[in-house]
Image: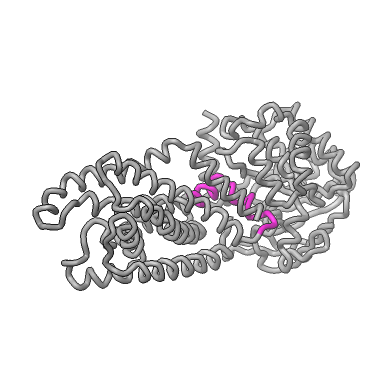
Amino acid sequence: MRVIYILWQRQLKRYFRSRSRIVGAIGQPLLFLLALGYGLGSVYREAGQGDYLRFLVPGIMVQTVLFSAMFFGAMIIFDRQFGFLKETMVAPVSRFKIMIGGALGGATTAVMQGSLVFFISLLLGFRPLHWIMTLMALVFMSLLALAIAAFSSAIGSFVQDMQGFQAINQFLVFPLYFLSGALYPLTHVPTWLRIIAEVNPISYTVDSLRWAMNGTSRFTIAHDLIAMGITLVVMLIFATVRFRYIEA
Amino acid sequence: MIEVEHLTKHYGKVKAVEDISFNVAEGELFALLGPNGAGKSTTIKMLTTLLKPTSGKLILNGHDVAKDPDSVRSSFGIVFQDPSLDTDLTAAENMKLHAVMYDVPKGEVNPRIEELLRLVGLWDRRNSMVKTFSGGMKRRLEIARGLLHHPKVLFLDEPTLGLDTQTRNLLWQYIDSLSKDKHMTILFTTHYLEEAETNANRIAIIDHGKLLRIGSSAELTAETKTTSLEEAYLALTGRTIRDEEVDPHESWRAIRRARNMR
């Protein structure tokens, strides 16, 4: 446990010391909130769907958690390039502990980033339906954050450079995000898009956050939790297996 | 303490290490010499569980490296050829992290960190970020860190590279005392032959992945009918310059080092 704790703490220390990372990771969601929230808000209202900002905020929080958690995989690549990975690889510590300690740290920072976006959206005029229910959002964000941090550590364990890592971000994570219903409702979309959204694990976190903050949900919350739980377990297994073959 | 039997490592057609065998006794200070690309670092990587041999057997502190990597990992300390510190943490935090990973008893962590940081002259800078350190300071910190868990065997891959004469002398004094007083088994590589000549009990010279000669400095010079270790070394390995095969990370690190020096 000491090992997991200190590796978790390392991620947090590095996060709090890197102001550029905190600001940088907030910049993109803020742009989305402003450009999309204000840009599409009137169209959305005219289409009879109500307040777009209210619809959008949970989606943007998921975006922030998603890409912040993916950043943990990039940290492994940096650790390899700067040589620190070797130090952990020769230590008498199981690969699983190294992975889970770091992934928990990466997930924690991702949830903090997501929460930060929540507070920014309050400044932009967003109000959740129930404040107490909103606390549930922390649980849902944590489930996604840990699953994605585990996934990204698996990617970081075999992708050798940042270019390769970015390619996976661009061709896998971005599409999954755009097809998750984070930015638009899935009620009137073509069937193929709906099917993709239904097998896409990110859709369920988006849905669960809307349930917690807006009181609306497309799937049921039980459905969301089961999907998120399965995703988390699969990702942890994937990462554990991949990490056995990691080379420094 | 270290037993190497018929160790071989092939990368495709490239024979990085070819049928090397040697033993290092407990408390011995053992030097591994050879030109760039001779297979020194590859041998150390295999001994330290970072690389799997193509064939051959490695025993370290009584544990089989292939079968029992975790027992092996707690038996040795290593100072790598290139940096392996977290530069966004402080010197003390790097030490602490290492102590926890190697399961140093809680009550001993802080006293040991203080003792070692004082020894390498970094105690006053313990709360500075490692990224503000010079190359020599980072090196000293890595050495202090490698000793933190009181390893039975210490691997030093070109430990004095880029250090000034004062620091090198101080460091060798300490390494010597570790070997003599604490009976630590130490295997090191270096390109400064005088370091091997003055400090090592025995020296192995390898080239093109093969073990050429093994013995004390006096034995090697006598066998080659030369007058110094350097002459013996050159008589065995020739005078041509070698290209070193590097993996992409190594070259990336080299670029970073060059940038940092500017």
Q: Quadrant of the C terminus of chain A?
A: bottom right
**Residue at 63% across, 64% down:** B10
Magenta span includes B219? no
- Residue at 16%, 46% (x, y): give it: A39
Horizontal and vertical percent position of residue B159: 71, 40
Instruction: Work out whether residue B187 can be spotted.
Output: no
Residue located at (23% from left, 42% from top):
A34
Give residue A175's quadrant in the image.
bottom left
Q: Quadrant of the N terminus of chain A?
A: bottom right
Q: Which of B65/A111 is in front? A: A111
Q: Is residue A85 magenta?
A: yes
Viewer-side residue, A244 vs B92:
B92
Q: Is residue A190 left or right of residue B253?
A: left
Residue B36 is left or right of residue A113, and the answer is right
Residue A109 locus on image (x, y percent): 47, 47
What secondary structure is the stretch in magenta mostly built from? helix
The way the protein has been coloured in the rendering is one colour
Residue A239 at what x, y percent from top left?
Answer: 51, 64
A67 left or right, relative to A236: left
Which is nearer the eye, A239 or B202? A239
Q: Position of residue B170 (x, y in %)?
A: 79, 31
Query: Is residue A175 at least partly visible in the picture?
Result: yes
Q: Quadrant of residue B197?
A: top right
What segment carries the magenta color? A75-93
Name above or below for residue A13 compared with residue A107.
above
Is residue A93 or residue B165 the one in the foreground? A93
